[in-house]
Image (spheres, grey):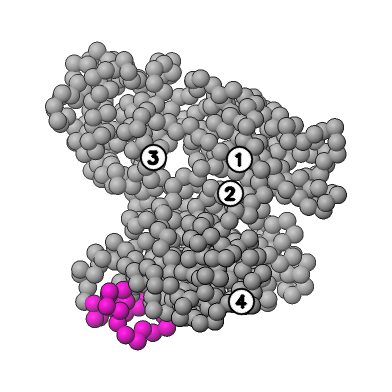
Amino acid sequence: MDDRNMESSSSILPDESNDHSKSIIHIDVDCFYAQVEMVRKPELQSLPLGIQQKNIVVTSNYEARKYGIRKCMLVTDALKVCPNLKLVNGEDLHDYRAASNKIFTVLQSWKCPVEKLGMDENFIDVTNLVQEKLKTVNITAITVSGNVFSEPTLECICGCHARLKIASQIASEMRNKIYDELGYTTCAGIAHNKLLAKLICPFKKPNDQTTIFPEHGASFMSTLQNVRSIPSIGSKTMETLVTHKIITVSDLQMVPLEILKKHFSGDMAVRLKNLSIGVDNTPVKQTGRPQSIGLEDSFKTVSVKSEVEEKFSALLQRLLILVREDGRIPVSLRVTLRKKDVKRLSSHRESRQCQVSASIFTINNGTLTVTDAGQQKLMSIIMRLFNKLINLSKPFHLTLVGLAFTKFQERMTGRGSIVNYLMNDISVQSVLNIQNDCDTSASSMDYSAVSPSSSTTTDLSDAEVEPSPKKPKKVTWIAKRRCLSKEEVASPSKLKVGELRLNSRELEKVSELRLSSRDRSLTPRASPAKDNLSDTSDTMKDIAEGGNCDNCPSYVDKEVFNALPDEMQQELKAMWKNPSSSEMVPRSSPRTMNKGKPNSILKYFVPHK
Ligand code: TTP
Ligand code: MG
């Protein structure tokens, strides 16, 4: 620390550090992949277990950790320290992703914002819930559930101690529920911001939780030996800090802001200083759908086109499974390559993307499918993009290939459309790849201000291999109707209406209605005589005019209709008024269905069979 002023008092900023109003929980699943395997096969529980991807043990259970197995150890080294290590291949992420989504769903049942971070971590902002609970508890009797980083000495006048104690109890309930319903043990960190909640989470592990009070934020941060421990400090920032001999978080606390400003932008310097003392005001952002869904595969070297094609073909098969689970129709495809420059001994990524025709994808019984011909078409698009990235007249050496669908057809009919409404807060589809290089569009702590992009991706994004279709061909969306199981009612985000996941608030209403009327569809239900909704003349007679459903078409269940939000009611009424603008057709009339607007809400209002 050459030129820095060591006066720490001038280094701590008079900032928003007094805002302790939030209550944040961070939950991290213990040895995640290993637990998924152990829950699936309980006989693995007593064995030292490692999860292998290629030649690396990406994680291991705590039994294996006793032998000194660490994350990302080479398999050969792991077997040296633990010859009895049971290895399970963890390259297929499907089950891990499914477990991750189930955990997310459990956490959503508290009706607080939940932000997914990677596969096995979630932030939950329980501020409002804590406020509610505060009204009903005796503050003096509240105790912390689990560990405390450091016992508080004086009560903070803002009341944060009581709030965080309640939050710690909520965290305990959440962890219990995850364990009871899914069998996974977890750790939790409880704090007034995301930074401290995340960093305190592993304080005691596995299967434990720790609360930190705001006044101990700076002292806790000063225990971190490496500035890299701060989640948002990326490799470039780290390099700059290390160059200036700022190695530990304590170093960062001590360095005067003015010195930092010489090496970083003003905002970034302030942000770094704040982080160093445990100050962070980034919000918990409810996780929605990913902007892209991609997979990558890396290898030593591939220099032959036919091998590249094989790799892409394998990736495409797996990617199509992810896209099917997601349910949206992709309209843009990106190909990524990592090229090895043999002369310079370096490598860099390049990408190209293009639009793909939505007609490649069809919906069969509510499931997104791609025919063999469609897959061939996708492969030919992929190889054309590949040809644009590689000059085949010269030798090439690749160390990674990646595929991602980067844009999706949102089946919306307008800004205030019911479809938009239904798609408001929907469950997560993690973006994963075989190497676990998460797609940048995946949810993450919003610390971008201090993390200059270290990506070497050159996204050319300009190749127009296939022109955008003017109209998607024959994409038929058919409402998939089924009864709700108890679990589905308890786990709102699982519910689907015509493959659209419902906004959780609406879902509650809808679920109640569905349950209260046995054998009744979510939707206005046709009487047997009026099952054929294409009978528009009859429908026209019954169009609702008033503010309620007194004049709805006769097949409409008024109770259900009246419980819908105003926007939905208005949208439906408008459609009933003007049936030519919508599709008044039953499932049994696929021919008619392809005419008119493909996304009409009325398709979701079809009777049970
Ligand atoms: P972590 O939460 O870092 O590790 P973990 O859950 O296995 O163990 P811990 O009890 O310490 O939390 O990562 C979650 C999963 O991500 C992990 O189970 C395997 C996977 N993973 C990789 O694929 N590559 C990696 O480099 C790391 C660190 C994890
Ligand atoms: Mg974990």
Across and down, in percent, residue 35 comes to: 56, 64
Q: Residues within 10 Å of mark 1 (few under 14, many from 20)?
A: many
Closer to the chain start, of discs 1 and 3, is 1
Q: Can you say which quadrant of the picture contains the C terminus? A: top left
**Residue 391 part of the magenta segment:** no
Magenta region? 139-162
The answer to whether residue 91 is above or below residue 385 is below
Which of discs 4 and 3 lies nearer the camera? The answer is 4
Across and down, in percent, residue 553 comes to: 21, 23
Mark 2 and mark 3: span between their CA atoms? 22 Å
**Residue 148 part of the magenta segment:** yes
549 relative to 582 in the view: left or right: left
Mark 4 and mark 3: span between their CA atoms? 54 Å
Q: Which mark is residue 423?
A: 3
Q: Which mark is residue 350?
A: none
Specify the principal SS of the magenta part. Answer: loop
Closer to the chain start, of discs 2 and 4, is 4
The answer to whether residue 456 is above or below residue 558 is below
Q: Give the residue at mark 1.
A: 404
Identity, as a three-letter code, of the amino acid under mark 1: Ala
Instruction: Pick the residue in front: 139 or 18.
Output: 18
Question: Residue at the location (63% across, 62% down)?
Answer: 235
- Which residue is outermost to the top? 537
Mark 1 and mark 2: span between their CA atoms? 9 Å
Q: Can you say which quadrant of the picture contains the N terminus? A: bottom right
Closer to the chain start, of discs 4 and 1, is 4
Q: Give the residue at mark 2.
A: 439
Identity, as a three-letter code, of the amino acid under mark 4: Asp
Q: Residues within 10 Å of mark 4 (few under 14, many from 20)?
A: few
The reply to whether discs 1 and 2 touch (Cβ–Cβ < 8 Å) is yes
Q: Residues within 10 Å of mark 2 (few under 14, many from 20)?
A: many
Residue 193, visible in the rendered structure: yes
